[in-house]
Image (spheres, rainbow, N blue to C red):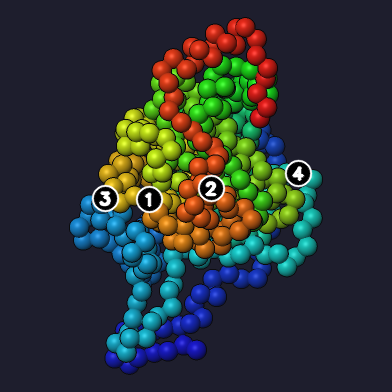
Amino acid sequence: MGASCSDCAIRQDADQLGSSTSSSRHAAPDFRCAQGGGLTSKGGEGAAGARGDDSGCGPGLERRVSGRGAAEEELAALLPSEQRAHGIRRLRCCRRRASPLKLEEGSPSRRPQPDVTRPWRAPNDPLRAEWEVVARGVSEQEYSRLQGFRRLVEARGLDSHKACAETPHTRRAVTLLRFLRARQGNSEQACGLLSEALDWRRDFEIDRRMREWKAELRQGTSARLRVLMRYKWTCVCKDAFGLPVFIHRESVCDAGGLLRELGSDFLLVHAVTEVEDAFEVAREQMLRTGVLRTSFVEIYDVGNYGLVPNYWQRGWDGVPFFKSIVPVIEKVYPERVRLAFVIRMPRSFWLILKLFWPLVPPETKKKIKMHGFPARAFREELIEAIGESNVPPFMLTDDMQVIAKAQPQGGLVPRGALAREEALAANGRPAIAL
């Protein structure tokens, strides 16, 4: 099936795409306790196999780079009007035969599908089981790099970090894999990012805050919980694999109002709790099935329906909220997004999007799909991504009667909303049914 041209330096090989993954896999590393030395691996040295650069481009490939260099032009490359591949330029010989794409190592398309041919029986040790799932689901080269990264993390003493007192973040294979992929296989850079994330966990005391917030959720009577539930704009559904799908209805949210009433720390704890819960669902499913899935679908509904007034003012007022939360989430939970859909996007939404675009990591930008208002523009892609039965009905139609009933409904947050709820709570109110 290969094709070559004597007048062209490019040799095409149609077998390239299928040859990156061998049927064999490394054995999972041997674990000792955190105090006893962590991980001993069987197999090749990951550190020696890792690339020294983090360009993300394999031999003979080059990234498509915008000559204009502005954020607006980078965004334009992702708009629906341009359907060409993002990040890699197709190579063609002089006879115009398309060369099969040789994708960069670690890119989503290059990563092999999980090896489901072998029956899965989870070891009793959850850490060992997690490493075995990863060994089944990635290439030998990536697994070797992951082993090398694990040795580096152990050598840097991160196992004893205070943030790992309750959860062994530094010994979990999937956690390390996400950080390594976020830095394109560069172990040193991934170790630096992991260290920053652990420092934030320690300094923000996120484990304690999440415990307190979950207790508050179970009780269901606090004033701030009532304000959040009344004006919330996010919800979670499931995809075809049973994993959480995050739906953000920016179209009806008043992020600035919630920030004013509830404060950034509270909203950050709530957002982190939802992400942590999603990863726990994914981990439980992974250990049960032996199938590696490490990321989620997110959907951003930004339609200007006129259901909540002051569309543009709400957008501007929400900028401080997103600027305070997005960098933390991206640092602590890298590579959590598999696909991000921005749907019903007005042309003028470009003005707000430009403010957030520099905050989005380059690898995440490749996963974003932007669509205009008509449901036909994104319906099929949503169905393919999460399954038709899982797509909320208002995303499958342009019928405003259906859209008007969509949940959550958000709304403008009045000034003093929290104070009023606190006064009512003092008189005793029944708990909220969550």
4 vs 2, front mark: 2
Mark 1 and mark 4 residues within 8 Å of each other at the beta carbon: no
Ranked by sequence position, the earlier of labels 4 and 2 is 4
Which mark is on residue 153?
none
Q: Amino acid at mark 4?
A: Asp
What is the CA distance from the residue labelled 1 to the residue labelled 4? 47 Å
Residue neighbourhood size for the residue with mark 2, other residues' Cα within 10 Å, grouped as few (<14), some (14–19), many (≥20): few
Quickly name the residue at label 4: 125
Seen at 33% across and 92% down, the residue is: 6
Q: Which residue is mark 1?
A: 345
Seen as rendered, the residue at the extreme left is 68
**Which residue lies at the image location 27% right of the left edge and 44% below the top edge?**
351
Marks 4, 3: nearer the viewer = 3
Image height of 430 relative to 297, above or below? above
In terms of sequence position, does the residue under pointer 3 or pointer 1 come before the other? 3
- Residue 209 is situated, as x and y percent measured from the top left of the image, at 57, 22
Vertical side of 357 occupied by 260: above or below: above
Instruction: Out of 317 and 23, give the one closest to the viewer.
Output: 317
Does the CB distance between marks 4 and 2 fall below 8 Å?
Answer: no
Residue ID for mark 2: 402
Task: Find numbered disc 4 in the image and state the secondary structure of the residue it sits on.
Answer: loop
Q: Which residue is mark 3?
A: 71
Residue 107 appears in the rendering: no
State the SS at label 3: helix
The amino acid type of the residue labelled 2 equals Val
Closer to the eye: label 1 or 2: 2
Position in image of residue 303 (x %, y %):
41, 46
Q: Residues within 10 Å of mark 1 (few under 14, many from 20)?
A: some
* In front: label 3 or label 1: 1
